[in-house]
Amino acid sequence: DGGITQSPKYLFRKEGQNVTLSCEQNLNHDAMYWYRQDPGQGLRLIYYSQIVNDFQKGDIAEGYSVSREKKESFPLTVTSAQKNPTAFYLCASSPGTSETEAFFGQGTRLTVV
Amino acid sequence: AQSVSQHNHHVILSEAASLELGCNYSYGGTVNLFWYVQYPGQHLQLLLKYFSGDPLVKGIKGFEAEFIKSKFSFNLRKPSVQWSDTAEYFCAVAPNRKLIWGLGTSLAVNP
């Protein structure tokens, strides 16, 4: 089945540790996105990539980093510099450069203790 | 600044009740409009969208939305909700090709 796979579904980390969230898609989409979802705050764009080896900051990129070495993969690293990392993280992809056609993964819930 | 406002943060209904979720946006130009739904434990998925044409848009699972340009609104409606409609609903607006999201409305339908 084609789709977007995020792993793991739940992730726990100690404060001060970097952690990498996985996002893989087999839809042959060019663009990929990372969002953060907090209760009562909707979705906020962290980073996006419209093509391999290129990515752009979204609205809340501070404390996060990404890479796009392969078309299928867009991992997100939550660094120790992120002040409030506990959240639900959503990955999405779209066939073109328009975010409006995005398909979403099931998300990773990160808890930092 | 461009923004999307969803009027109700939490809605509780009984089965068979009618639903209307409000969505207003602040942008004067041409926009594309969306409603997304996130069922418990599932991924966010597109419910319906409006790009142009008939301002009354029909989506999946009996949902519809009406674009009223003069009111900058794109309200979501369903005549008779079911327990399975319990979910979080997000309105989003794209004045260009970038999405601006509302904060979401949590709908709980009691059987």
Image (cartoon, grey):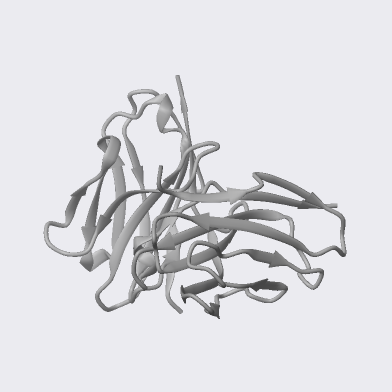
Report the residue that reaches farthest toward the front.
Answer: A70
Task: Describe residue A36's horizontal placement relative to residue B93 as left or right.
Answer: right
Q: Looking at the image, can residue B102 be seen?
A: no
What is the x, y in percent for residue B9?
A: 51, 48
In which quadrant will I find the N terminus of chain A?
A: top left
Q: Write the residue at 22% across / 67% down.
A: B70
Q: Write the residue at 29% across / 35% down.
A: B61
Between residues A57 and A73, which one lies in front from this camera angle?
A73
What is the x, y in percent for residue A102?
A: 39, 60
Q: Write the residue at 80% across / 65% down.
A: A18
Image vertical order of residue A30 relative to residue B82, above or below: below
| Number of numbered callouts drawn | 0
Report the residue that reaches farthest toward the top.
Answer: B111
Report the residue that reaches farthest toward the left.
Answer: B53
What is the x, y in percent for residue B101?
A: 45, 62
Q: Write the residue at 31% across / 47% down.
A: B76
Q: Looking at the image, can residue A83 be seen?
A: yes
Res. B32 image quadrant: bottom left
Image vertical order of residue B31 relative to residue A9, above or below: below
Image vertical order of residue A113 relative to residue B82, above or below: below
What is the x, y in percent for residue B68?
A: 22, 61
Task: Describe residue B34's horizontal placement relative to residue A41 as left or right.
Answer: left
Task: Describe residue B34's horizontal placement relative to residue B10 as left or right.
Answer: left
